[in-house]
Image (tube, rainbow, N blue to C red):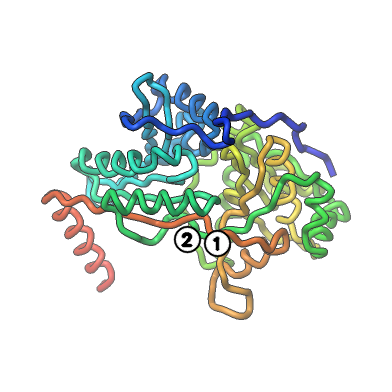
Amino acid sequence: MRDVRPQMTAAPLAPVTPHGEPPRAPEALVPALLQRGDDDWVRCEQDLTARGLPHQLLARSAFVVRRNDVETKLLVLRDADGFCWGGLAVHVRPIKGVPGHCTLHAERFGASIAPSALEAAARALANVLRRNARALRMDVDVFARDEETRLAASRALANAGFRNADSNSYVQTLTVDLLPDEDQIFASFSRSARRNVRQIDKHPLERRLISDSIYIPRMEEITRQTLDRTGGHYAPQDWKGRIEFSNAHPEMSRIVGVFRADREGTEALVSFAWGAMHGDHGQYRDGASTRVEWNVALSYVLIWDMISWAKAQGALWFDLGGVTDGRQGESDDPLAGISDFKRHFTSRVERVGQGFELQATTLRARAARALVRARALVRSRR
């Protein structure tokens, strides 16, 4: 099997105080909402890295400028000298059936903001909603592996008027410690996972990077097949932008597939996975697989590829992209099979998230929400 893993790179060093703690943000921080293509976006990313704050992939300028499926802005908090103490992606999502109106969605609120700046960041998010006359709601997903940071982020949002809500992401996940060497990490997997990773060598299959947009229709086809098996709903993805970004920044994003060596063209692709780097950790973002005539589990080798890649970029841990409590054959959880698959790599379940929302209170927002409910009621009666 062809080895397509990158070489090890050094992780960036972050400044700390003499006591080993991150520096404290000043009392006065000025929020700003940066637009796509703003030259100051990259400078804020550099400030966050220098302060040891992990900056999520979906909030990076180089990723956002290639993204065509959603409008993204960056909420930043600056001190009097213009240095950034926090950065957060805010997505603008149009509402179907209510032209000109939208919801706002802030991802991964917590780790990418200095702990002492969380209260200011929460207030800034609330103000972003109030100043957007056409936004009906602000959804916020807290994300932090550290419990103290996660609880502090949740308190900050509650103090700013947000209330608990269903998360747009996941609240718990399976994690893999990347501090041991690769052999030790591999040995920590279940026996069946190790066997399935090696099994690909026994068939005309090979692992290769997906760097050409010609494979997008095949990736969408495989995704639909996977969702049909799990009862999921298919939504088009911006694979073109992701592939272009991965080609330009292989240290931050990686799309890899399993290909049949006995077939030509796009039909040779039978499984794929997308991994993302978020500063201190890597994440399994997305993936899908089809069926082949051999008794081989196609996705195991791709997860191992993602884990090896993340370690090579200096990640301290790996996030397997969420897990549910259901077990296949023991519950009606449609994601039980996927969760069982992920458990072959680790048994460490950690709570990482919580959902919050803030409703706009203007007359326009109330009228628009009433229209959304009315149209949903009409559809349900048809």
Which comes before the other along the chain, label 1 or label 2? 1
Marks 1 and 2 sit apart, C-alpha to C-alpha, by 6 Å
The residue where tag 2 is placed is: 233
Q: Which residue is mark 1?
A: 227
Density class for disc 2 (Cα within 10 Å; few <14, some 14-19, many ≥20) is few
The number of callouts visible is: 2
Check the picture and name the quadrant holding the N terminus. Answer: top right
Type of amino acid at the residue the image marks with label 1: Leu
Q: Does the rendering let one see residue 244?
A: no
Work out which quarter of the rendered image holds the C terminus and state it: bottom left
Q: Name above or below for residue 259 compared with residue 350.
A: above
Residue appearing at x 33%, y 44% in the figure: 122
Name which residue type carries label 2: His
Q: Residue at x 27, y 39 (%)?
A: 128
Left or right placement of residue 143 versus residue 268 in this view: left
User: CB of mark 1 within 8 Å of CB of mark 2?
Assistant: yes
Q: Name the residue: 69% across, 45% down.
A: 306
Residue nearer the viewer, 121 or 377 = 121
> For numbered disc 1, what is the local secondary structure?
helix
Q: On the rendered structure, is 61 left or right of 365?
A: right
Name the spot of residue 68 as percent of width and height, x first.
44, 36
One can see residue 232 in this view: yes
The residue at 45%/26% (across/down) is 44
